[in-house]
Every structure is written in C-alpha cells, then in structure tokens.
Image: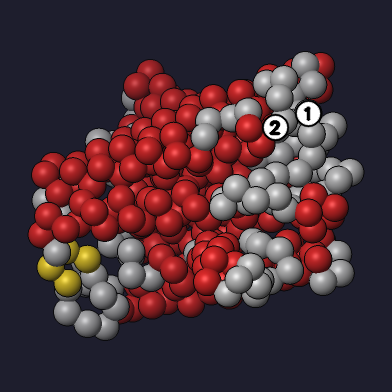
Amino acid sequence: MAYLDLLKVFLPATIAFFVGIALTPFLTDWLYKNKMWKKKAGKIAPDGRETPIFNELHKDKEVGTPRLGGIVIWGSVLITTLLFWLISTLWPGTEKFNFLSRNQTWLPLFTLLVGALVGLVDDWRQIKADQDCHKAGLSFSRRLLIVILLGLIGGCWFYFKLDLASINLPFMETLYLGWLIIPLFVLVMIALFSSGVIDGLDGLSGGVMAIIFAAYMVIAFFQNQIDLSAFCGAVTGGLLAFLWFNIPPARFYMSETGILGLTTALTVIAFLTDSVATLPIIALPLVATVLSVVIQLLSKKFRNGQKVFQVAPLHHHFEALGWPASKVVMRYWVIGIIFAIIGMIITLIGGPKL
C-alpha cells in the first residue's frame, strides 16, 4: 500500500538523522582530543599554482576545526541500513521495511562506502603529515585513478549485469549507446568527483547534497524504486544531521571522506533512475562549481594568466567580492532547491513510462 511505501522511505530518513545526531558528540570529542585538523590553512590550485586570494580569505579558518565530519553521514547511513535489515531478519512481519536489496541499493551503498574510505585515507594523511597540508594527502592523480577504476567497475556492472545500454532523453527517444554506457559512466563519475571542491564554506556542501539526494528520493519513489528511495532518504537524513553541526560556525568539516563517498554514490543513483540527462539540472550547484574551475584554468592557460573569476570555484569568487559566507551558502541552497524541483519535474514527466 502507498502509505507503507511512504513510511518505508521516511522512516530511514528520520532514523538516520537521529543516528547522526547521536554519533556526533562521540565523534567530535575524539576529533578535538586528537586535533584532527589541517596543520596549515590554504590550498594549491589544480594547476599547481598558489591561491593567494583564497588563502587570504581563509587564513583564520580550517586550522583548529576538525576534518572527517563526513563520517557522520556515511556512518549514519550504514548503521540505519543494517538496523532495518537486522529488524526485518529478527522480527517477522517487518520484512517490508528492509531496503537493502541487490537490484537497488547494494551498488550505491558499496560506492558510498568505498568512496568514503578512500577519502578517509586522504584526510588522515593530510592531518597526520608533517609537511604542508596540500602536499600531504593522496595526490589528485591517485584519487582520480581510484575514481576511474570505480567508474569502470560500475559501468561494467550496469552494462553486463543490469543490461543497461541506453539513457533516457526527456521528451525524446531513448538514446542507445551500447558499450559506450561504460565510458559515459566513468565520465559522469569524474565530473561529480571534480565537483567535490564545493566543500569550501560552512554549510554549503551539506545543504546542496541534502537537496540533491532528497530530489532523488522523490524521483526513485515515483519510479517505484522504493528501496532506492529509502536509501536516498537515509542519505538525506545523515546529511541533515551533519548539517546541524556544520552550520556556521562549523563544528567540523565534511572533507574527502564525505564528499567523495557522496559523489560516487550519486553517479550510481543517477544511472539507476535513468536520469543522467537531467542530473546537471538537479545538481546545478555542482555543475556551476566544476565549470567555474574549468573556465578559470582554461582562461589562465590561453589568455596569458588572465582570470575570469577573482578566485575559483564560484562560491569563493562571491566571497572575494565581499559577500558574507552565509549569504553565498543560503543563495546556493535556494538555487539548488529551485533547480532540483525543475529537474524532478522534467525527469518524471519527460521520462519513460514505468
């Protein structure tokens, strides 16, 4: 019945939120006790150059605030998923509420955890290294290689195991790709991985990601992928728990262990819901973030060092213009909500009839 499906979706979201809230005091106590933060504020641009404007804006930030806050997100999702599976196993009659299923949630959960663990290693190395923090973690090329490997595994799984060989184009004929679905999967995962730089202001990445996963919770529900919808609900609940403590002033940062897990899982969810074509609309803040970095790098390379933005990504450009960080974050939330709604409408109305 429909109300049971709604309950199956909203219960994990609620439970994951409270699990995340309950986890946070123990996590933050450990993070602060062990000084799990960067040893030096600032960063290096993707082209290897210094970022003086960013470093000036953030000279009093990052140091003293722990990383690894993403553990709250994937930790609450994992605990919630196992909790509902355990209840359904031990308590007859509750099987309906188990959303851990091979065809819908195994793959997104797997990518969430693998991405999170890779990010955890990167964060740990950055925190513990004696040298400058921007040289301490896993190199960009190593992280990119891992993402490409995950993308290849995921793409092959969709093509060979799930027989996915086409994508839906809203209001148009389905586009048949055949084996090209594999490189497309890899490209989407790389693009979302690149958008991880949105984790740069208190509350920004948590709010934007919560909006995106909530949108996919709705999309999956109306596509009758109830288990996947419940999983997206659990991720949304975990994100909201994280956001509760990440709103300025942040108690901790999401860092790579959160953002890398989320972006890899989001790739899988976009393909499972056949909404790859509308993903750029649903996740517009991520797209704007990636494009601003690409435009900035190309401009500096081909225009003799001239920049389009004062600093990239885009949210730091607004910060450099004098916007308070809270204004940037909340306007990103507003834009994210509006375009997530637009993307949901296009996906559900223009998508294949299930």
Dot 1 surroundings within 10 Å: few (below 14), some, or many (20 or more)? some
Q: Which quadrant of the view contains residue 223?
A: bottom left
Kind of residue indicated by mark 2: Cys
Is there any visible trace of residue 71 in the rendered image?
no
Work out whether 316 lies above or below 201.
below
User: Which quadrant: the N terminus?
Assistant: bottom left
What residue is shown with label 1? 39
What residue is shown with label 2? 133
Image position, residue 149 (x, y; %): 31, 37
Is there any visible trace of residue 220 in the rendered image?
yes
Image position, residue 347 (x, y; %): 36, 72
Depth check, front residue: 295 or 109 = 295
Mark 2, secondary structure of its residue: helix
At 11% from the left and 51% from the top, the residue drawn is 163
User: Which quadrant: the C terminus?
Assistant: bottom left
At 38% from the left and 77% from the top, the residue drawn is 346
Disc nearer the start of the sequence (2/1): 1
Work out whether 337 lies above or below 19.
below
Image position, residue 262 (x, y; %): 49, 44
At 17% from the left and 72% from the top, the residue drawn is 175
